[in-house]
Amino acid sequence: MNSINQELRIELIDSEKAFLAIKDEWDGLIDKSINPSFYSTYPFVYTAWKHYRNENNSLFILLVRRDAALVGIAPFRIDSMNVGNICLLRVIRFIAEWGGGDKPAIVTTVKPDLIWDRIFQFLNNEFTQWDGILLKEQPENNPVLNKRFFDNISYSARAIPEFISYYTSMTGTWEEHLKKRGRNTQRAWKNHRKKLFDLPEGVKFQCIDNPEILPDALDRFIAIEQSGWKKNSDFSVGGSEKQKAFYEELLTHLAHKNMVAIYFLTSGTTDIAGVLTYKYGTTIYPAQITYSQKYAEYSPGVILIAEIIKMLFGTHYQEFDFLGLRDEGKSRFKKEWSTGTRQTITVEIYKKSPPVSLYIMGKRVKKLAHKIYKKDLKSAVQIFS
């Protein structure tokens, strides 16, 4: 262990009381973090834990301190599951995978490599009651890939390409951005926008971020969503009581910090489309998008996203993060309106043992069957590579 890592110590947070007690420290750390992300903020992580945990989940938040100073947070949980009647498998994962969390990350004010080094030393030598680590939606250059588990014969470790994440950089002007979208994209946007805004009752663009009226705006958003194909879906805001309760509480926490806004396109008294966005630092995240099927021919979701991006040019915001693109066929507009991409990966690390090997094999067989069913043969080949 090098001298720098000897200075770092791990403090385990595994109780609700302790989780609540570190709120102010967490908020202070993320304000100074060198890798800030909305999905690592205390409001998101705590609210996700509160609404999605069950009896098989345990808190496993690792605080990294240098003396008394907090320099890193790994907001983990441990998922426990039975592998047949053989054993209980314990897998370490990010809490922020829940609630639509995207690209979950550790929070740190020092080099992430140092934090990961200390975390892995802790898991290898001090806390060994785990069987696997599963890190979803990580950057392809994640420092985890350089760590000892990938060279240790006692572990099975691999990085799996996941999906492409698209974003728009707010450099230049809206006019310059629009010129680079391609003729077909420009033509379709102009035609649909003109037809939509020429409706008899007209169309208004509305941004709501006032804490007092955000609850009503959320109800309006859910009403649009539940009137169409997203009705009662697992990934929609109002798809279940659990989902709705999560968003209601999260928006309450965020509204007073100016970290959320809901945008609408409205014709008369009818809401045509809505986008629920998170705001953090210089980045905007469109967490949920919905539109009325009645106006589908005008591509109202695309029009609303374009209106938001247009509004952001010339502000302090530097990036519009489209978040993960899991189904390229259904989200073509993300590609058309973005200026850059990031590859994400899943990192899997498992201890080598018969029960764990049985679990991994079973999981890969299920994935293989799904990919073959979807005729995604390229991805099917990668499953056992």
Image (cartoon, rainbow, N blue to C red):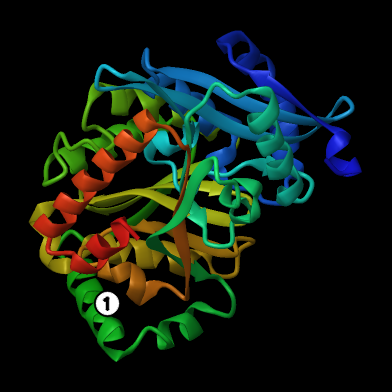
Task: Tell me if I can see residue 63 in this picture.
Answer: yes
Q: In this view, does 291 lie to the left or right of 64?
A: left
User: x and y percent of residue 310 in the render?
Assistant: 45, 69
Q: Nearer the viewer, residue 95 or 2?
A: 2
Q: In this view, does 117 lie to the left or right of 128?
A: right
> Tag 1: Cα neighbours inside 10 Å, few (<14), some, or many (≥20)?
some
Q: Which of 352 and 325 is in front in this view?
A: 352
Residue under the image location 39 percent in, 56 percent down: 324
Question: Quadrant of residue 356 in the image?
Answer: top left
Classify the position of the C terminus by image quarter.
bottom left
User: x and y percent of residue 29 in the render?
Assistant: 74, 36
Question: Quadrant of residue 328 in the image?
Answer: bottom left
Classify the position of the N terminus by image quarter.
top right
In this view, 202 is above or below 184: above
User: x and y percent of residue 96 in the render?
Assistant: 48, 36
Residue under the image location 30 percent in, 56 percent down: 383
Task: Tell me if I can see residue 270 in this picture.
Answer: no
Q: Which of 263 and 204 is in front in this view?
A: 263
User: Judging from the image, what secondary structure is the residue with disc 1 in?
Assistant: helix
Residue that label 1 marks: 189
Q: Which of 162 and 168 is in front in this view?
A: 162
In this view, 117 is above or below 310: above
